[in-house]
Amino acid sequence: MKNKKYVLGGEFMVSDLEAKEIFIPEDFDEEQIMIAETCRDFIETEVMPNLDRIDGQEDGIARKLLDKAGELGLLGISVPEEFDGFGQSFVTSMLTSEVMGSAYSFAVTYSCHTGIGSMPILYFGDDQQKQKYLPKLVSGEWAGAYCLTEPGAGSDANSGKTRATLSEDGKYYLLNGQKMWITNAGFADVFTVFAKIDNDRVHSAFIVERTFPGIKFNPEEKKMGIKGSSTRQIFFEDCKVPVENLLWGRGKGFRIALDILHMGRIKLGGNVIGAAKMAIDQSVKYANERKQFGQLISSFGLIKHKLAQQVIKTFTNESAVYRASRNVDEFIEAHLDTMTKEEAIVKAFEEYAIEAAILKVYGSEALDYIVDEGVQIHGGMGYSSEMSIERGYRDSRINRIFEGTNEINRLVTIDTLHKRGAKKDFALYEQGEEVIKSLENIPECSCCAEDYYENRKEAVGGFKKVGLMLMKAVSDIFGRQMINEQEILNNISDIIMNTYVAESSLLRVQKKDEAGEDVALYKDIINVFIYDTAACIRKEATDAINAIFEGDKQKIFERGVESFTCVKPVNVKEARRRIADKLIEENKYCF
């Protein structure tokens, strides 16, 4: 591991890292901090004063904001300088995503434009396509969008019916079909559109301009949240697309779609951090102002519990996001001698498909918890549109559906890990077999080290063993039919996700400690999270075991789970109170 330039996607299940080997948010350099501050200033001065106008979709407001973001260089963070961008690292683009995630509906507009609206051209376009479109997308002169979903093709995107046929003169492709849930459709100038050429089995992708003949738009969709984000259906009726606007090549659209989804998932994991921190700020400020029974509600134990849980979920998500983001940069750096940067980026997204799915699921569900409890802390006022937390609550819900539903992403996590193990990219099933062999002589508790970090690493190692033995058991018993056991796969996927987040958070705190920081409160976060995670993994594993085994085999596996999820007792009440007290004292997220 130490001699490798990068870790493999999913390899965290079979390998251990040292704290110094991961990137943490405390490692941001001055330039990254300045870019983040530029984003915050933009949101504070341009977005927040105009939230009602944005949600009302006032004509031109979204485009005006994109123009201003373009003037500040915020639309080209990831785009190379040769196309008028900043050419920043993936970690920096993730930091930008985090900060812009606090911009409510405009966060969706921005993320669509800078991500799925621009990146397909950057990653898969030829030189002519890049030169024509990227500078205008970077400046904000043109806005981008992405057209994949159809009425009958959501999670099963490749079942789309939109077709492309070559014109008689061979100069155009004629597109016919319908796309729905298209973000930025109300004002976008450039669309990446997926369609099957003739009777092809898989999609191709096309760069389509709004001015091309044969495009019609439905009115704006009425949505639960993200009301300021333009969402429309688009109809293509013999839409004439020049042959030179075929993106990357015939039949390669599905590959583009998958790679862009991986990117979107990891970006969403970062995006929700900004929204979560903002919701926590709103929650603690209200708790520090609202009095009941003659005292501030922030003094109540159950309010402190909610505030502390909000912090724990945000801190742990953030830890995992930036660990994975740096992995992407390391992969890119390791392959620049054999690939272009764009090719290396695409390969990196494929490599870390497991981590991307984890971050998407964990982050979106963490934010849902945070805004839900934020409303609860506000009480009746939280249900009023006068309070910002109400907008955040509605806007959060889409994240569990965006970029593939969380159900799909749980299956992506387990299916991709299974394939990596079957190909022997790393010793997944070999280690799983070793864990199963050890079950006959398992100790009552496998977590007994006295040193703080060694003890918690033993706990995380136990979590890994639970996942490994269940992966091996399911693979052996069900074989190719394992995909039909979605409930069991969901159990194992949650075990893997929580393990990755727990390890990422623990390594972050250890790295902070080794740098000489005061980490007492951060140890509280780790203690509560690992304690709670052990209980969660025990439940998920037991459910899976009961669905797989009976009799003696069932008892042996359950005994293993009990040993591998045995952790030191934690006074979670007092730990959460200490976390909440710090938040209450600072009156803002400060971790």
Image: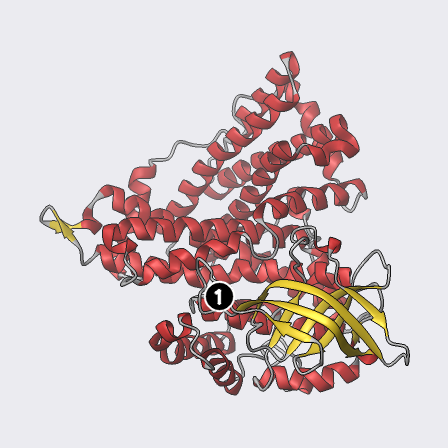
Q: Residue at x 12, y 50 (%)?
A: 295
Name the colouring of the figure. secondary structure
Q: Position of residue 281 (x, y in %)?
A: 32, 61
In the picture provided, is 549 more to the left or to the right than 283? right
Q: Quadrant of the C terminus?
A: bottom left
- Looking at the image, residue 127 sits to the left or right of residue 456; the answer is right
Look at 61% across and 36% down and name the residue there.
Answer: 492
220 vs 425: above or below? below
**Image height of 246 relative to 286, above or below:** below
Q: Amino acid at mark 1?
A: Glu
Q: Nearer the viewer, residue 580 or 569?
A: 580
For the point 68% across and 62% down, the residue is 148
Question: In the drawing, does residue 100 fall left or right of residue 153?
Answer: left
Rate crowding at label 1 as few (under 14), some (14 to 19) or many (20 or more) other CA atoms within 10 Å.
many
| Residue on which disc 1 sits | 98
Q: Residue most toward the left?
A: 294
The residue at the far right in this view is: 169
Q: Nearer the viewer, residue 142 or 474?
A: 142
Q: Is residue 22 left or right of residue 281?
A: right
Query: Does dot 1 land on a helix, a strand or a loop?
Result: helix
Can you give x and y, in whole percent of width and height, for residue 217 in the image? 60, 72
Q: What's the residue at 79%, 61% (across, down)? A: 203
Where is residue 276, by image quadrant?
Answer: bottom left
- From where the camera sits, is residue 17 visible? yes
- Residue 410, image x and y in percent? 61, 44
Q: How many numbered discs, if any? A: 1
Residue 471 image position (x, y, % from top left): 68, 34
